[in-house]
Image (tube, rainbow, N blue to C red):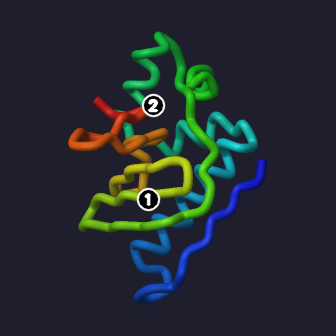
């Protein structure tokens, strides 16, 4: 499986969009490589907790069973203060900024007409 992440350069280098895009690229590479410990570390605390509660076990054992699609190309990155949305070819991820960086709050998200996104994993 190939992960392709391309973004046009907007704004200043190393700005929030660049950092969010880099974090999403690492998340998607870890997903493709089956690096479950990295995936769990990249989740926001409430999202990780939700994954563990749903699986009744550790995140590292549960995350591989989640139905997360392959990413595809980045189509859009929106940053709103401490929140971000990254629309990829076949997935949408939501992130939040924490003291130690951007963390995934929801992944495996698909848009639905006139309704909120439907996400495979999300925080409570």
Secondary structure, mark 2, is: strand
Q: Position of residue 40 (x, y in %)?
A: 54, 36
Question: For the C terminus, which image quadrant?
Answer: top left
Nearer-the-camera pick, 75 or 28: 75
Labels 1 and 2 touching (C-beta < 8 A): no
Nearer-the-camera pick, 112 or 51: 112
C-alpha gap between disc 1 and disc 2 = 15 Å
**Residue indicated by mark 1:** 86
Nearer-the-camera pick, 41 or 33: 33
Q: Position of residue 34 (x, y in %)?
A: 72, 36
- Quick one: label 2, few (<14), some, or many (20+) residues within 10 Å? some
Residue that lies at the very extreme toward the front in this rendered image: 113
- Residue that appears at 40% across and 16% down: 53
Q: Tell me where residue 78 sits by quadrant.
A: bottom left
Q: Tell me where residue 46 sits by quadrant.
A: top left
The relative height of residue 76 versus residue 24 in the rendered view (above or below) is below
Residue that lies at the very extreme toward the top in this rendered image: 56
**Residue 104 vs residue 70: left or right?**
left
- Residue that appears at 42% across and 79% down: 15
Residue that lies at the very extreme toward the right in this rendered image: 1
Q: Position of residue 102 (x, y in %)?
A: 42, 57
Q: Position of residue 79 (x, y in %)?
A: 32, 67
- Residue that appears at 48% across and 69% down: 19
**Residue 88 vs residue 97: left or right?**
right
- Quick one: label 1, few (<14), some, or many (20+) residues within 10 Å? many
**Residue indicated by mark 2:** 120
Point out the tag, 1 or 2, that comes first from the N-terminus. 1
**Residue 27 vs residue 98: left or right?**
right
Nearer-the-camera pick, 114 or 5: 114
């Amino acid at each position: 499986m190939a992960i392709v992440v391309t973004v046009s350069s907007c704004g200043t280098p190393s700005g929030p969009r660049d950092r969010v895009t880099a974090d999403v690229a690492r998340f998607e590479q870890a997903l493709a490589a089956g690096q479950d410990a990295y995936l769990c570390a990249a989740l926001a605390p409430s999202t990780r907790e939700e994954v563990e509660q749903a699986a009744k076990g550790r995140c590292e054992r549960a995350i591989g069973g989640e139905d997360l699609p392959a990413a595809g190309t980045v189509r859009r990155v929106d940053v709103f203060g401490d929140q971000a949305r990254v629309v990829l070819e076949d997935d949408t991820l939501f992130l939040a900024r924490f003291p130690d960086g951007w963390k995934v709050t929801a992944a495996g998200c698909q848009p639905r007409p006139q309704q909120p996104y439907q996400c495979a994993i999300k925080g409570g």
